[in-house]
Image: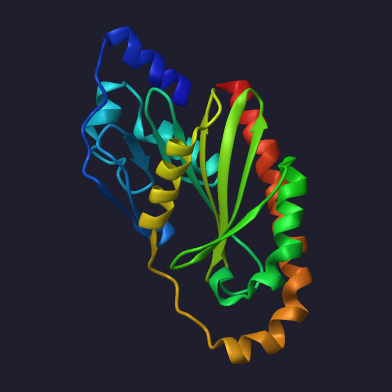
Amino acid sequence: MKKVVLCLLVMFGMPLMVHAAKFEVPSADLSFDLADEWYVFTRDNLEGNSDLEDLEISVEEMQDYFLEYDLYVDAFTEDYDFFIYKSVTEDVGSLPDYYDFELEEFATSIMDTYGADSYEIYDNDYKYVRIEYFESDYYVIDYFTIIDNQYYILSIQKLEEFNDDERKMMQDIIDSVQFDNYEPEDNKELIIVALGIGLVVVLGVTALIISRVKDKHESKETV
């Protein structure tokens, strides 16, 4: 779908539309900021969206695209693609309520599944597992988190390797994200059960990750 949109932009010589910096996505319980040059579609801004009309893409086509791949945000410029995926996971709470050492096995499983060389536990107001890797001709940076039993992947990709300024740009996007569904737990109480459910987190989320990898390959093959 994205490639179709970009082809239409080139064909008609259309500039990227100017959008507001902040985007609210109630269906995903979050908001985030993007610079004006981004072309942004979310599950919540499709109805009456003049950008879709200009590109001759129907609301139904975009809705089907979002539903098929558990997508809630599809944003892009000429150089970058930015996606937000969300799925329901097991009863594991929220990643920010876990200690870093509890997330090591979870983070390692993500790194191994995607073939990344390393991972980072990125801790801002929330907590993410960050990896960087190469897949199907794309360089990719992914941030993974779980908030209120909702599993999120925030992903940026491009055809050329990321430089430090671009990595910082993605980090700034991540730092702008606010989750409406996050309520911090009492760590003293959480640590008693966290070790016991850690394996459930890894097993459940790893299965979802593997599914997402397959979906990414299928999506790129069919657009």
Specify whether 97 is left or right of 22: right
- Residue under the image location 69 percent in, 52 percent down: 208
* Picture mark count: 0
- Say which of 118 and 96 sits in front: 118
Q: Residue 26: where, in percent of width, then height?
A: 35, 59
Residue appearing at x 24%, y 36% in the figure: 36
* Identity of the residue furthest to the top in this view: 11
Instruction: Choose top left, top right, bottom left or bottom right for residue 132.
Output: top right
- Is residue 73 visible in the rendered image? The answer is no
> Quick check: can you spot residue 106?
yes
Determine whether 46 is above or below 98 in the image: above
Q: Quadrant of residue 168?
A: top left
User: Quick one: quadrant of the C terminus?
Assistant: top right
Residue 43, image x, y percentages: 38, 46
User: Residue drawn 75% across and 80% down?
Assistant: 195
Q: Looking at the image, which is closer to me, 105 or 207?
A: 105
Residue 120 pos. (x, y %): 62, 55
Task: Name the image colouring.
Answer: rainbow
Q: Is residue 115 left or right of residue 14?
A: right
Extreme residue toward the front, this view: 164
Where does residue 174 sit, x and y in percent of width and height?
43, 53
Q: Residue at x 45, y 73 (%)?
A: 182
127 left or right, relative to 37: right
- In the image, taking residue 186 as reference, residue 176 lies left or right, namely left
